[in-house]
Image: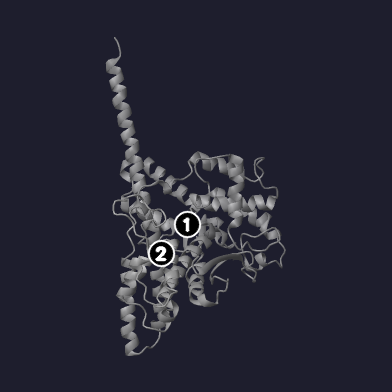
Amino acid sequence: MLPFRVRHFKGQSAGRRGEEIVILTDARGSPAPHYYPNLFSITEYRNVGRSPNTIDKVLRAIGMAKVWAETRGRNLDQELSEGSFLDAADVLDLTRFLGLNAIAQLSEFEASKGGSNIVRFDCKRPQRDNNDHSEDSDEAVPSNEVGNRIRWVAKYLEWHRHRRFDSRNITEADARLSEVAVKVVADLQAKAPSNTTRWGDDETLEAPDPEVLQRVETILMPGSPENPFQSSFIQWRNYLAWRLLSDSGARRNEVKSASVDSVLASNNRFEIRVSKTVPRTVPIIDLTANAFDVFFFEHWLELPENSEGRRKGVLFTDAKGDPLTSGKFINRMFLAVRAVIGPLPWRLTPHTMRRAWNHLLSLKLDRLPEGKRFSPQQEAETRIRIMGWSENSRQAARYNRRHIRETADKIAQEMMDQLYTLSDQEEAPL
């Protein structure tokens, strides 16, 4: 196995209790040799609400980059923070190494334990018969995964460069080295393979149908005989979380992090203040505003006054008033609902609510009169604002393309139905 591990454990400190923590360690489990990667993952990913799964993948990519350096007798973090950074040849070789799977990477690492620090990697990998065109699954790494590895490592290099050179007075020699580092980072980013399938009109944007959403609404309605939760407090808390997800298409962490003053019931607005992308204020309907009023006045205000949730104004707490430090209560809510609904052809999850919101927008736009329909740019701007994507995000374009494809498919189907209906009429006996 490669000489690093990515460990998951539950936080025990105040404010982190129960939160899933992800760190990079050595093979023995010590994080000491990986101080910088763990600091990077905390500041750039965990503190902005990125999922443990994403942090795991980022740390694995950085671990691979450190193994690459170790196979060449070098210390990546030391070079990035104190040494001569990397050069163009390093970028090429690092890109190649990140494109290998763990077996091939381990082969190079073990081969480097011999005398010389210089590794001839062309003789370390197994040779293939030129006539053998079969796919070697042991070596193949999907291009989108390779691209992500390269981009994450490039971001790590840029983080090191920024900490080392920016926002302080540096010598002329360091200024020149910073310029070289900027080019190295850009060169590495440019080596990431383009991922055309990632942005294609594939099935990853599938969302629950409106009828399914209405079914979930019926189940989670407080007092419903199908509601899988017994406590009135939990029923209203979960229902409010469901309504905020449904109205806004917000991320799970954006809803979980809400304060009691984040929901402006009188104005039918929800302020998303904690976001991994763009904080924003989005509209909610009367049903959601009323759910907030009931939960706030009949349940939240009944929490112990000395509880942490009451003192800090945290909206989503347990029945004792302790803040819910993760969005797992939302996950449990969806799992319980899926158990009531039964097997489905897709997974009903918190994140599919973002897709559901975009699907409902597409349906709404299709129903508008001809003169009031949005242009593609207006449609993209609407999605970007409500979803909290950056202006450079390609997500809005993906949903726009999907909307166009669905509309085109519908028109084509109607056209063919009409064609065959006319054909049947012409062939009918007199």
Q: Nearer the viewer, residue 24 or 325?
A: 24
Whole-percent x, y for residue 58 in the image: 46, 65
Residue kind at label 2, given as amino acid type:
Arg
At a point 49% along the width and 49% down the height, the residue shown is: 352
Q: Which image quadrant for residue 301?
A: bottom right
Whole-percent x, y for residue 315 in the image: 61, 60
Residue kind at label 1, given as amino acid type:
Val
Question: How does the figure colour the protein chain or chains?
Answer: one colour
Q: Residues within 10 Å of mark 2 (few under 14, many from 20)?
A: many
Q: Nearer the viewer, residue 215 or 62?
A: 62
Res. 40 mark: none
Whole-percent x, y for residue 19 in the image: 60, 64
Badge 1 or badge 2: first in the primary sequence: 2
At a point 71% along the width and 68% down the height, the residue shown is: 306
Q: Mark 1 or mark 2: which is in front?
A: 2
Q: Residues within 10 Å of mark 1 (few under 14, many from 20)?
A: many
Residue identifier under label 2? 149
Total numbered labels placed on residues in the image: 2
Task: Give the spatial CA distance, label 1 vs label 2.
Answer: 34 Å
189 up-or-down from 395: above or below: below
107 up-or-down from 425: above or below: below
- Left or right: 332 with respect to 108? right
- Left or right: 179 with respect to 231? left
At a point 37% along the width and 73% down the height, the residue shown is: 119
Res. 282 mark: 1
Q: Secondary structure at mark 2?
A: helix
- In which quadrant is the C terminus drawn? top left
